[in-house]
Amino acid sequence: MITVLVDHNMEGQAILLWGALAVEGWLALVPLRLVTFGEVGLPFDSDDRTVWRFVQAQRMLLLTNNRSMKGPDSLEQTIREERTSTTLPVITIGSLDRLDEQAYREHCATRLVEIALDLDAYAGVTRLFIP
């Protein structure tokens, strides 16, 4: 089972994405599970370093769109300092607003499945932008 932690600021959009995965039949074929910060006990105001360390320790994928790129605990800085050859990538939605569009949402869903099916190939990769 591949668990995907959805960033707290995009839970509604992630539900739309998960709906696309279900409608297209992917969830019956690919062992994916969506969880929220609340479900895993992470405070909503967790800094990027805390979130990244959590998902790596739990072997989860982080689905996000706008984690900070500035400061000592930014996602980019954390990845640069702590990435190894076995870390899992962060999945970043290229345009969160476009998840309202069915075609874009379907492309994102398909790309997420492709990543999940070949996750070992992405070990050590920092970020993957979808679609």
Image: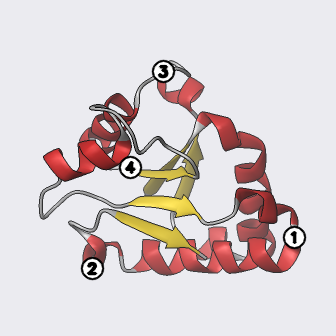
Q: Position of residue 31 (x, y in %)?
A: 51, 64
Label 4 sits on residue = 60
Residue type at the position of mark 2? Ala
Residue 71 screen position, x and y as percent: 33, 33
Most foreground residue, 81 or 2: 81
Q: Secondary structure at mark 4?
A: loop
Question: Would residue 9 be found to the left or right of residue 73 on screen?
Answer: right
Which residue is at 23% across, 68% downward?
123
Given residues 68 and 92, the one toward you in this image is 68
Using the numbered discs, state the Cα–Cα distance from disc 1 to disc 3 in whole angstroms.
Answer: 31 Å
Q: Which residue is mark 1?
A: 101
Callout 1–callout 3 Cβ contact below 8 Å: no
Find residue 66 and report its horizontal and vertical position in percent: 56, 47
Residue bearing mark 3? 41
Precedes in sequence: disc 4 or disc 1:
4
* Mark found first going from the N terminus, 3 or 4: 3
Figure quadrant of residue 9: top right
Q: Quadrant of the C terminus?
A: bottom right
Q: Tell me the SS state at disc 3.
A: loop
Amino acid found under the numbered disc labelled 3: Gly
